[in-house]
Image (tube, coloured by chain):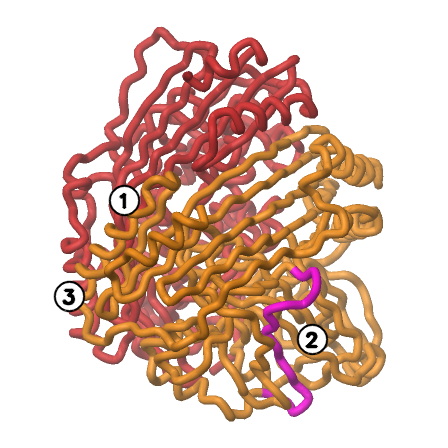
Amino acid sequence: MEDRLREAVARSHADYTEARWEQVTRSRVAFQRDQLMALESGEEAGGIVRCLVKGAWGTAVFTDPADLPRKVEEATHLARTASAHVKDPVALAPVEPVEARWEGAMKRDFRGVSLDEKRRLAEGYNKFLLGFAPEIASTSVRYTDAWRNVIYANSEGTYIEQGIPDVTLMVAAVARKNGDIQQGFESLGYAAGFEVAQGREEDAAKAARRAVDLLSAKPVQGGTYTVILDPDLAGVFIHEAFGHICEADFLLKNEPMRKVMQLGTPFGVRSLNVVDDGYRPGERGNTPYDDEGVPWTKAYLIKNGVLTGLMHSRVTAHKMKAVPTGNARAVSWEYEPIVRMRNTYIEPGTATLDEMLRGIERGLYACSAFGGQTMFEQFTFSAAYGHEIVNGKIGPMVKDVVLTGNVFQTLQNIEMIGNDFKLEGSAGGCGKGGQWPLPTTTGAPHVRVRNVTVGGR
Amino acid sequence: MDILNRVGSKAEAAELYEELRGGIAVSFNGGEIETAGSETVLGRALRVIAGGKLGFASTAGGSDDALVASALGAASHGDPAPFRFAAGDRTPVVPVPVLDPAVEAIGVDQLIAWGEEAVRRINGEFPHLIVNASLGRGTIEVVVRTSTGAERREKRSYLSMSVSAEQIKKGDIWSVYGSQFVRRAADLDRDALLDDVLRQLRWGSAIAAPPTGTPPVLFMPTGVPVLLLPLMTGFSGMSVFLGTSPLKGRLGEAAFDERFSLTDDGVIPFGPRSRTFDDEGVPAGRLPLVERGVIRSFYYDLRAAALAQATSTGNGIKGSPLGGGGFRVPPGPAPRNLVLAPGAGSLDDLIREMKDGLVVAGVLGLGQGNVHSGAFSNNVGVGFAVKGGKVVGRVKNTMIAGNAYNVLKEGIRAIGSTPEWVFGGLHLPPLLVERVSVVAQQP
């Protein structure tokens, strides 16, 4: 395939051409209650060609490798057709051509672990959950692994081969009592080997205990609170609330917003530092080379409370006179790269949890994330559970905790940043522009924010 | 050699699913075409029952041998198959019309022209808005064959258009979105789509104070999924079997308002998720889920049906009700086209009737939360305040919360008369309800 790719991009008549071919080996085990819902392993392969002609893109997605030369012509033709309608042509920021081969490290290569052993691992967690308490009515356990072999070539001479491991585990328990149904779950995801999914009984216990506890939790009372976000949720918060608006593709045709996102603008308290990092050993968001062949960087988005960087593709970097940061990522061979996050986190501060609790008469301790969504400066994210904070102490459990706000105000409202940093790769993934689930990692310490709107009854 | 033959004596039974997707798409960013693309994708999935045990594997661009080996390998570690693959059915299946040759004739120039027209219309009235759009057309050909004699083949066409208009000012950013997904070229009503987007843009020109407490809330068709999403899980035969559905054991019970009737209809001619057969080769049909408030049936794929000692309702679908899936995932119970029976009164009538309240056109965080229990809590992404029966402007920093099962039993005030297709396969009228709590930061 290497020769085919190199030859296809070299022969192209487009202004710029790139081709990516991926071979994915994956397996999956899923249990629900007493049912083995999925047990599978397999391989797939497919590719995408992207051509730039006079400032417009043409793309072609295919699964038959013999189609490659024809797909380059097709993408070129589509780009040419589109270019006749373009007034503001797209162009690429320069990057040095690269020849590279990279492989993610695994302590125990999951490709050598039998499907039977993967099944036994998941089944063990499932049995543990089912036997945890009489209230547990059902369970869901899902293990997945995938090895992505990505080869990439472009007409500027770049050729890269990458082997990217990905392992996820999700354990969930459903508890039922008097018609009420509650769920507790824990999940993890790493760019690592089988070892990270082993020995997770404590996670299963946490999930089951929470499902049972939520049966007696009250729904949170809606209103405005001082909130302490636990590290899991604070990580999702910075991803949802802030990360997405730092993805420069959304600023590309958006001059007013580019002014708002001007580098050097104060965005939060002085102790706030936010990073999007292309490589942290073993983390799920790792992108050693992005899907435009750009090597990883560690980019400070906020340093000492000031906006210092954005995440770029080659197109956005050209438009905004910046340097490509290695954030152009595609969720699979079926898609073109768009600007996405990698490992995004808030750096630790100095406060302890006790210091954060002090002085809160009536607040909320919001923990673990169901998920989140962003619409520019408006964001929302839901906690898996929470606790009331009463007179500086963590009180009774509450459920259905959903937080919302305006990112600019909320960042200014951060009061304290904890000293207890944690990175968290979940089993889910980030969605944008129809591309989901993209592996990302989020991280943070505890964070205290005033004046947060919480939905509820 | 044919793949079912290749499985041959190594398994008692096999089922092959193939999909061939082909199409073109264009995307506009900031009012201008950015990308034109094409796809030709062949995906396949094989299920086998070998030694009594079930195995699954899928591939794209892979060899027959590898696919067979993976499926047999999975079966060797699998559990006993609780069901049988579809058998050859001698009763003729009535084909559902889902292919329009006119769709395949639409070229990339045509899609670009439609996108440019959308940009012109919106920027003509709202010059400062940033308009993004995507349009696509194509076909998906699905073949399901089993060693037990089923052989189904169907080619379905699609044509889609979505448009968003965004206003960006510091401290006041908002976005309105509209989309259509149709199977027949003549069904793409570009004017209706743009009219809807423009109406919401006009409604939202001013900012209004959100009503709070428990005001009447009018869900536009694009907002109704907040209430229906828990039901899509709750009516799944698998959720019922596993005990995670609150509807378990309640067939025949009046669990909803008597004006509430919900049907899963897989055979609407040219319906967005219509099909002659499901992804397991079982003929599709029409399934009443709720009739005048009474729970009538749950939907089943072959596996859930066998476990629950029921019959497959032709709801074995690869992917969730809101899309996704495809050849990579095994089939599971999911609705085809969910149709909520309309009532009386246009959208304007309902707005007049509610006097003071909140209109919800879309939320952030749909489906995040405890979907099983019916609890919802969402930021209102696109919503409007109503005063004295008139829309007075859009709301900001507003959250709604409640329980869908509770709202649909005790809280329905009126069901509108004007259903629309949203999110692909949902045909929904506007719904005016109570018992939703609204929390907001006052501007």
Between label 1 and label 3, give the one nearer the viewer: 3
Tag 3 residue? A84
Q: Point out residue B238 in the picture as x, y percentages from the top left corner.
A: 59, 30
Question: Can the viewer see residue A429 in this picture?
Answer: yes
Which residue is rendered at x = 39% and y = 77% of the image? A94
Residue farthest to the top, as pictured: B90
Mark 2 closeness class: few <14, some 14–19, many ≥20 residues within 10 Å: many
Rendered image quadrant of residue B174 = bottom left
Residue ID for mark 1:
B23
**What are the residue bounds of the magenta stretch?**
A268-283
Residue indicated by mark 2: A227
Question: Disc 1 to disc 2, how far (Cα)?
Answer: 48 Å
Q: Quadrant of residue A137?
A: top right
Tint applied to chain B in the drawing = red
Query: Can the viewer see residue B347 in this picture?
Result: no
Q: Earlier in the sequence, mark 2 or mark 3?
A: 3
Residue at mark 3: chain: A
Give the number of the mark in front: 1 or 2: 1
Quarter of image, res A365: bottom right
State the residue in front, A42 or B200.
A42
Contact (Cβ within 8 Å) of mark 1 with mark 2: no
Q: Colour of chain A?
A: orange
Q: Secondary structure at mark 1?
A: strand
Between marks 2 and 3 in the image, the one whose residue lies nearer the viewer: 3
Q: Is disc 2 on the same chain as disc 1?
A: no
C-alpha gap between disc 2 and disc 3: 53 Å
